[in-house]
Amino acid sequence: MGTTKTKRFCIDALGIDGASIGKAFQEQNKLSLKWLAIITEHLKTQGAVFDTGLSGPLAHIRIKFTSANSAALITLSVHDKPAASVLLFSGESPETEQALGKMFVQSMRRSFPLNATGGKADAFEQVLSEKDRPLMVVVPIPNDNIDESDRELIKEISQHLADAFLVRAKP
């Protein structure tokens, strides 16, 4: 009798200064099957690159998604205000991961200059050497116009996006 290994991914949360907020593992069986089905269908319908709003009661949420070779860059927005930047690495293409990782680091440094955040000279570069796979790096973006319920919604959507892209897409 074999054992079933739970599928999971690593979440590495960073502040806007590039410092680690925390690291955890998200197990697939802890996520909502309903949300996963909706997000998985959204990814299948929209393809590898899209910038689209959700519908219905989630119409105020926008997902900008760019993926290549099982790695992705994502920006989640609430009422067109950026709420989180996300980087996803599957481990399938180290070259693509390095390229997207460098783009992510550059983008974060442009958006959150070191002199404004007090970040270190190598801020965000730890994503380039992170070994855990599959990996979700998330940078929550502070904005007083985004309330706590929408913050929680962004967190849920980002985790379900990561699972749908990194874990569920695997055979």
Image (cartoon, rainbow, N blue to C red):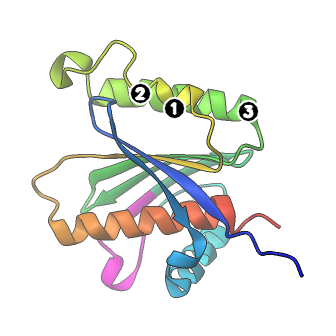
Identify the image quadrant of the C terminus.
bottom right
Say if 124 sits above or below 78 in the image. above
Identify the image quadrant of the N terminus.
bottom right
Amino acid type, label 1: Val
Q: Residues within 10 Å of mark 3 (few under 14, many from 20)?
A: some
**Spot occupied by residue 42 in the image (x, y as percentages of width and height):** 58, 73
Indicate which disc residue 94 carries. 3
- Kindly identify the residue that appears in the image at 59 percent across and 72 percent down: 28
Report which residue position mark 1 lands on.
127
Q: Residues within 10 Å of mark 2 (few under 14, many from 20)?
A: many
Q: Is residue 60 left or right of residue 131?
A: left
Indicate which disc residue 124 carries. 2
Magenta span covers which residues? 53-63
Q: Earlier in the sequence, mark 2 or mark 3?
A: 3
Indicate the secondary structure of the residue bearing disc 1: helix
Q: Residues within 10 Å of mark 1 (few under 14, many from 20)?
A: many
Q: Is residue 147 left or right of residue 131?
A: left
Say if 111 sits above or below 81 in the image. above
**Spot occupied by residue 40 in the image (x, y as percentages of width and height):** 62, 74
